[in-house]
Image (cartoon, coloured by chain):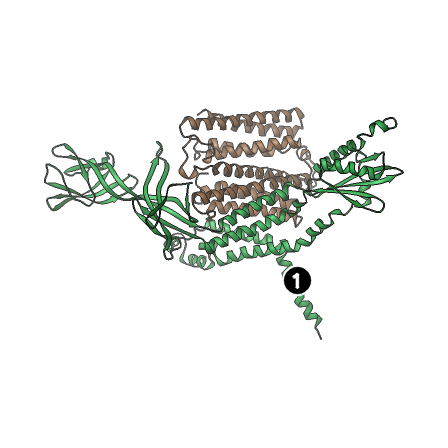
Chain colours: A green, B brown
Amino acid sequence: MRNPVAEEKEKGFLSALWDSLSSVRLAIPLLIILAMASIFGTVIPQNGTPEEYLRIYKISTYKILRILGFLDTYHAGWFILLLGLLSLNLVVCSLRRWPSVRRVFSRAEIKPEEGQWKAVPSGRKILFRGAVKDSISRVQQGLTRVFAQPRVLEGEGIRYLFAEKGKFSRLGFYFIHFSILVILLGAVIGSFYGFRGYINIVEGESIDRVFPRSGQQDQPLGFKVRLDQFRVSFYPTGAPQEFKSKVTILEGDREVLTEPILVNHPLTYKGISFYQSSYGVSSVEKAVLEGVERASRRGFALTVQPGMKVEIPGTPYALLLNRFLPDLQGMGPAFQAILFEGTRPVENLVILQGSSDFVSQRPGRFQFRIREIDPRYYSGLQVTQDPGVWVVWLGCFLMMAGFYMAFFMSHRRVWVRLTDKKGETLVEVAGSSHRNRYEFEKELERIGQSLQGQLSQGQKKSSKGDSA
Amino acid sequence: MISTKMIGSVTFLYLFCTILYFIYLAFRSEPMGKLATWVSWVSLAIQTAAILLRWVESYQLGFGHAPLSNMYESLVFFSWCIALLYLLWEWRLKSRVIGAFAFPFAFIFNAYASLAPGVSAKIDPLIPALQSNWLHAHVMACFFSYASFALSCAVSIIYLIKLKRKEKGEKEGALTSLFPSLDSLDELAYKTIVVGFPLLTIGIVTGAAWANYAWGSYWSWDPKETWSLITWFVYAIFLHARVTRDWRGRRTAILSILGFVAVVFTYFGVNYLLSGLHSYA
């Protein structure tokens, strides 16, 4: 024997689960929790190093935050789980609402109640001087012209014409909700099959491997990228104007294409995109220095290759640039250098660009400044492969279409009832709209007027005398 | 810069508009209402001319770009969007009652642009990250959505004031009786959000498309992105609560105000309190 109580209980649990999954009651708290978690994620620095965290938090706080996943909130298991629950909720909600939407679609022909016909204003009740069958084609023509092509429905001794517009606006909510799933799907595809990394290439060199952001093994690109040239330009204000990497793609040793990469102008080859993201000076080929011997006040120019000792003409001294500093404490590029007397180092120097007091006030045998440097740049490129990105854009497009349908279109239905009144026909126009009723009322008025015109056309001659 | 001086004077004009709309409410004087509308359109025209002039001036400086590139320009554009949206709305609905609550927003943002010491009115050339046509679509969608949300916030504030009066059992004063009924205020707040929400979505989507083009990632949980999503969540909650759970009145009014708080935080808070990629405005 079956146990009705247990069965009821089981059914109760399952249906309760189904109910909560399919209810907006779940969607709203989920959205609230997601919003709160996101707030935490913007307040707590994300993906920092332990040292950075210990500077702001106590060790106990740090440990709790780490266990709860708040140091990488948006990739924490529970955050993904919440997104998953939201998706499930969306799917179940949509499935559950489907029958009622389908009913609207299939029962679109249902006729208005008698009470609604009574409420039709006199402006939309037209008397046609002719038989019902003669009026049909006229109404059809008129309605097609001002609204939509109608269908003829048979009632009990009464003919109806039915036309509708914007039926699909009822599907708008489906589009929006479905689009969220599509966007999340795109993100999932990206995270499984996509790749995000970076490469630093020095001018004149090429690279065929890419280093992932997440610190895994470097991966082969399948082709080579060579940096031909990097240039940075500045506005007179000192703000950067353009970062430009001229890059050549090589298949084996064959040059396939040469293209510049700029910010807002990436290069895509074989589904892999390269974005300009950083740059720097990797080394200096050659520098021209201006020097003054303090004792004799004699000035001279010196062309130096870093790492190579250069004798200062007319003196027993020689200079070695041993380190290039791209930017010394905001004062611009600088060299660390050593002054030799014969083979004996006698002075450590810092050589700056421009005639800085920092240099001239220093005691020493010489003053130097950088007149010109010929830097060899490296360019930092972000490398991305994301096959999911088009799915994301498709989702965004669907969402916009859904918004348009759901908020700016309305399902409008017009019924025309044709009743035989002793050889004449009473034409009544009723309608309904599931949104913007006020505006639809005006549209109905226009439809009524236009039908009146259509029905009285060609009748004026015969019925002119007795029309009121 | 002449445009900067013009924008500065618009601050006082918008303050004047606010006062006129309040006088209109207090005395229910139709001529005063007409004056308020007229002054507002003139002020908007001056602000429009100033924005266009700033555009021209940027070309004269040799690095022309649309005036949508920094905090100052975005504040002025925000103020412009609010004034324009309100005036179109007034024209369409033939009702001036929201003006006294809409113009303070236009005034505050324009005043902040002109007077705040941290906001520079200098026209600067575009840094590489901003040199994109996405800039126009992204900024316009965002600020028109913010402006609709500002209006819905204004309407919700009126709603709560009127509701409080009613609950206290007070007879309706001269002020509150002029406002539309509670139901139509509720409907107005909903309608402005229905306009703002898709616009905010377009703003986020164009931002994502741009980020993907400039940085190679359409979403990186940058504070600006995250806060725009939080704002989106708040209005999504508003729409779900209203459409499917039939929330009306006080609770949705509070949600609409809360939504605008999120908007303001997305706009200002993120820049001043949090650090991220989106540091221009």
The one of B152 and A119 positioned closer to us in this rendering:
A119
Q: In the rendered view, does A318 fall on the left or right side of A234?
A: left
Q: Which residue sits furthest front? A: A254
Q: Which residue is drawn at 55% across and 43% down?
A: B201
Q: Quadrant of residue A256?
A: top left
Q: Is residue A73 in view?
A: no
Q: Mark 1 falls on what kind of element? A: helix
Q: Residue at x 56, y 40 (%)?
A: B199
Q: Which residue is drawn at 40% across and 28% down?
A: B62
Q: Is residue A99 in view?
A: yes
The one of A372 and B32 positioned closer to us in this rendering:
A372
Q: Which residue sits furthest bottom? A: A1
Q: In the rendered view, does A223 fall on the left or right side of A176?
A: left
In percent of width and height, residue B14 lies at 55, 29
Query: Quick check: A195 above or below B59?
Result: below
Q: In the rendered view, does B72 fall on the left or right side of A90?
A: left
Chain ID for label 1?
Answer: A
- Location of mark 1 (residue): A15
Which part of the image, by quadrant, shows the N terminus of chain B?
top left
Q: In the rendered view, does A126 fall on the left or right side of A318?
A: right
In percent of width and height, residue B162 lies at 66, 39
The one of A76 and A244 positioned closer to us in this rendering:
A244
Q: How crowded is mark 1: few (under 14 residues within 10 Å), some or many (20 or more)?
A: few
Q: Quadrant of residue B95?
A: top right
Task: Give the number of marks.
Answer: 1
Q: Which residue sits furthest right? A: A422
In percent of width and height, residue A38 lies at 50, 51
Amino acid tagged 1: Ser
